[in-house]
Amino acid sequence: MGINLKDERELLSKPGDTIVETLEELKMSQAELAERMGKTPSKINDIISGKEPISVSTALQLEKVLDVDAQFWLNREMQYREKLSRLDQEEALEECKEWLNQQPIKELKRYGYIKSDKPGTAMVAEFLQFYGVATQVQWQSIYVDQFASVDYRKSEKHQFAMGSIAAWLRIGEIEMRKLNIQEFHKDIMKDNLSTIKKLVRTHPEDFAERLQALCLDAGVALVYTACISKAPISGAARWVGGNPLIQLTDRYKSNDHFWFTFFHEIGHIFLHGKKEIFMEEFEGYTLNQVKEIEANDFAVRWLLPEEFLKDLPDTITEKDIRIIARAYETHPAIVLSRLQHKKLVPYSFGNTMKLKVVLNDLLANS
């Protein structure tokens, strides 16, 4: 069995041990050392015991009295304090091992963000580095408390979900850093929405790349990331470092869901504050309903205004849906999805009009 951290701390050699050895060679007492250095015996005792570090001034005094170079004492002190700090950190990591139970370890390993094979202090250190925080306390403050308001229901299941949500959000931040983002221009983004609306209607093969480029053109970071278990999220919107960040998944695998999610999230960017994080509602997490309705209305206005309902015949056919889509310059899947949501047609009706969305080649963590 290896030496535990407590034993390792006790066995760690202090600079004071070398002072004592030097005094023995010189046949000098600690009291005489104190007198020659102009310090009190208690101060010398604190230096020898490691309670007080060897300063530059003390090192120069030791150089004169003990005839040992000041740099030696400074190096000795630095090495001791570094080893002591590493032991402190190792003990702190040891205490954080249970924190790993909240993290989606398997998925982050599969996506290459974590390398350690087994849960332990090395993995804790990797997770702290992944999140860019010094301790679990900062993780809690930045990735939980900032978006875990009173709207959250506290439970063990909820706490586990927090780790998955935090990891998913952090992936978005990491991938955002890889983009060459300019200053955000709201007017440019608004103009680009008209071009994006054409992508909705035509849905070309490279729609996702073109959408990302149009967002980037206005200073909006759009990143595509895979879903993580316990974080059933299609999209999220927030501000990071002065720029909007929209993070999307292909969770529902259909173009109607994809486009509504995008316009919903861009709605949050246009309408709401920079200090909030917007995600969809799921078990353990409820939303600000007023702001969600506002974002929904924004998406509706861009994708298919409510006035389309006045054009509906009594019996709706697929042909009618395609006619409405052409009239409102949108995709038939958008019309169909709205009709299904309003229960005007069954969910089993017309689903061949919906196009499959799979972002495998674009997902940052796939």
Image: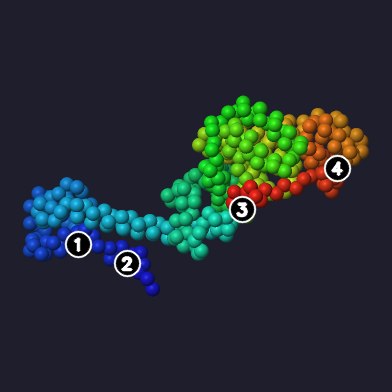
Any part of residue 87 in sight: yes
Are the two marked residues, 4 and 1, in contact with CB atoms closer than 8 angstroms? no
Most extreme residue toward the right, as rendered? Answer: 315
336 lies left or right of 214: right
Q: At numbered mark 4, what does the secondary structure look like: helix, strand or loop?
A: loop
Q: Which residue is mark 2?
A: 7
How packed mark 4 is, by other alpha carbons closer than 10 Å (few <14, some 14-19, many 20 or more), is: some
Secondary element at tag 3: loop
Which kind of residue does numbered mark 1 sit on?
Answer: Asp
The residue furthest bottom is 1
Specify the label residue 17 is tagged with. Answer: 1
Question: Where is residue 209, by image quadrant?
Answer: top right
Q: Earlier in the sequence, mark 4 or mark 3?
A: 4
Q: CA distance from mark 4 to mark 3?
A: 36 Å
- The picture places residue 109, in percent across and down from the top left corner, at 55, 58
Which of the two discs, 2 and 3, labels the residue nearer the N terminus? 2
User: Dot 3: few (<14), some (14–19), or many (≥20) neighbours within 10 Å?
Assistant: some
Question: Residue 111 at x, y = what percent?
Answer: 57, 55
Distance CA(mark 2)–CA(mark 3): 44 Å
- Circle 1 packing at 10 Å, graded few (<14), some (14-19), many (20+), is some
How crowded pointer 2 is (Cα within 10 Å; few <14, some 14-19, many 20+) is rated as few
Q: Residue at x 62, y 45 (%)?
A: 224
The disc at residue 366 is 3
Q: Amino acid at mark 2?
A: Asp
Q: Earlier in the sequence, mark 4 or mark 1?
A: 1
What residue did someone put label 4 on? Answer: 345
Rounded to the nearest angstrom, the CA distance separating label 4 from label 1 is: 84 Å
Residue 298 in view in this figure: no
- Quarter that holds the N terminus: bottom left
Q: CA distance from mark 2 to mark 1?
A: 17 Å
Q: Nearer the viewer, mark 2 or mark 3?
A: 3
Q: What amino acid is labelled 4 in the image?
A: Val
